[in-house]
Amino acid sequence: MTNDNDLFFRVAHRHTDLMHVDSELSAIGQAIASFEANPDLTYNTESDYPAVNFRASERVEMKDRETELLEMRDVAVRELLPSYLALVSAETRKLEAQFENPEALAEECLSALSTVVRAYAFRLRTGLERWNGVVDPLIQFSQGLPLNAISSPSPEVKHTEPRAYGSCRGIETQDREFSLLDVGAETDEFFRTLTRSLMTVLDEERRNGRPTTNSTGGVEGTVASSS
């Protein structure tokens, strides 16, 4: 049984043979065309034959070689074509088995992103609730302590962000300052920041993934990602 590597190299070898024949055919064709466009052109030759007979003989030789090359080309094509078709079949089967549909891949990526986003959003909310769960009783316990310069020349505890009825949202001590966090506002900021960052990443990857085009208009490849 021939493996895919053997098949690939056989196709490459036979294609090279075909290209060599085509190259010589092209050169012969140009020489014949040039000959026929300048039938009266003479050559410097050491032959004893007249120049016109030499050119006629040369033209016959070129035509004979052209015929020979055309026959060689037919043989090369017959040898290449079955191997080429077998290679196409083998390689496309592998591609179809390995290819990931862009739409399906996007759905899978979105699913993964959704899982990660939900996990980090849960961490955020848990952290905010834990923070407020500690800060709120600390604020309540500060009630009754000297909180301003009237009751104490150098208050060790200060209320910050005052609210109605003498309450506040924060506490300032000699080495600490903390306050209750707005869970809704902090969550919104998290998602705004995440959205901006994701849009930047998506735009960069979209630009990096655009195919480049070769001189014949075909797709050459993709621009490598900078990441």
Image (cartoon, rainbow, N blue to C red):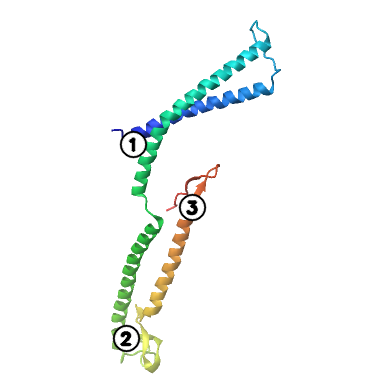
Of the numbered discs 3 and 2, the one sitting upstream in the chain is 2
Quadrant for the N terminus in the image:
top left
Of the numbered discs 3 and 1, the one sitting upstream in the chain is 1
- Residue 169: in sight, yes or no? yes
Q: Marks 1 and 2, Cα distance to the nearest angstrom? A: 75 Å
Outermost right residue: 40
Say which residue appears at 57% left-offset and 25% top-offset: 27
Q: Circle 3 is placed at which residue position?
A: 210
Residue 93 relative to residue 68: left or right = left
- Position of residue 216 relative to residue 157, above or below, is above
In front here: 99 or 119?
99
User: Which element carries disc 1, helix, strand or loop?
Assistant: helix
Q: Circle 2 is placed at which residue position?
A: 139
In front here: 108 or 85?
85
Question: Is disc 2 surrounded by few (<14), some (14 to 19) or many (20+) residues within 10 Å?
Answer: some
Image location (x, y in percent) of residue 70: 51, 24
Q: Circle 1 is placed at which residue position?
A: 4
Question: Is disc 3 surrounded by few (<14), some (14 to 19) or many (20+) residues within 10 Å?
Answer: few
- Position of residue 76 relative to residue 109, above or below, is above
Asked which quadrant contains residue 17, the reply is top left
User: Which element carries disc 3, helix, strand or loop?
Assistant: loop
Mark 1 or mark 2, which is nearer to you? Answer: 1
Say which residue appears at 40% left-offset and 58% top-offset: 103
Of the numbered discs 1 and 2, the one sitting upstream in the chain is 1
Q: Marks 3 and 2, Cα distance to the nearest angstrom? A: 56 Å
- Position of residue 223 relative to residue 156, above or below, is above
